[in-house]
Image (cartoon, rainbow, N blue to C red):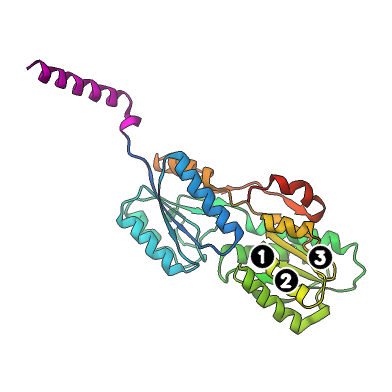
Amino acid sequence: MIHTRRFILASALIGAVAASFPALAAKPMVMGFSQVGAESEWRTANTTSIKEAAKKDGVVLKFADAQQRQENQVKAIRSFIAQHVDVIAFSPVVESGWETVLREAKNAKIPVILTDRAVNVSDPSLYATFIGSDFVEEGRRAGRWLVERAAKMPNKVINIVELQGTVGSAPALDRKKGFAEAIAGNPKLKVIRSQTGDFTRAKGKEVMEAFLKAEGKNINVLYAHNDDMAIGAIQAIEEAGLKPGKDILVISIDGVKGAFQAMMAGKLNVTVECSPLLGPQLMQVARDVVAGKAVPKRITTVESVFPAEVAAKEFPSRKY
């Protein structure tokens, strides 16, 4: 009888403590995250940042790699809905084609956060917020650097070839737009070839080989929508007997370590930063969204431009 009373008292005490400190009894937040794939150094760093931040923050992360296919992302999002996760986050492969699945998430009362890439939907309430870079501004920064450099070049015409990212993706569309805006006022600057390299090193090399075969020494500048394509293109330039960074100026976007190494080797002239380290910010915003707090519709990351001249100094501090 005495043991029974002690058990009842102990149970009551535990219940009282749990009631006083509800966080002790709260379930961890569950996040479903669909990643584009693993097409570049940037994407690998982005995935690592998200996984590490989730672990540190006590978030249960259900991670799905879409292997750069939209249909895989749609399946993953529907799976997250079926599992009744607390929040869904994803980096969309392309901008369009999301209305139906995002409406399904909204009907299930599961908030959606976009990371790195935006979507084009008729109803903005289908997602809570977008965390990422201003891709148009990144393109402008690349273009502005070239405009300044062009002023010091004797060429009457400066021929540019462009390696675009994945067709229909937000960074490819916006980086192209921003670059075009920045160089529009300079009659010396002319884009003579523009084709997708799908954000991969192998495809960047392949397309640059085709550019060189078609245009040869007429090419003065390569503008690549990401560092991996630029690094692949650099290989093609060298194999063609030309010097990247000198015979052909090379401009790229992302700011990964590989780009800094290429700059230090004199093969790449400038990289525009696009930080992949979105994990900690995503976890905090997700908690706010799940708690019903108001968050900005657009959260922009702070980034810089790194010309080759500062590469050696900046390289030791790069985290990706």
Q: Is residue 55 left or right of residue 238?
A: left
Q: Residue at x 48, y 49 (%)?
A: 51
Q: Which residue is mark 1?
A: 225
Dividing the picture into quadrants, the one containing residue 223 is bottom right
Q: What segment carries the magenta color?
A: 1-25
The residue that label 3 is drawn on is 245
Q: Is residue 191 visible?
A: no
Q: CA distance from mark 2 to mark 1?
A: 16 Å
Mark 2 highlights which residue?
Answer: 235
Looking at the rendered structure, the kind of residue marked 2 is Gln
At x 53%, y 51%, the residue is 48
**Residue 291, label in figure:** none
220 magenta-colored:
no
Task: Determine if the magenta segment contains residue 18.
Answer: yes
Main SS class of the magenta portion in the image: helix
Q: In the rendering, at what x and y percent does residue 228 appear?
A: 65, 64
Whether pointer 2 and pointer 3 mark residues with C-beta atoms closer than 8 Å, the reply is no
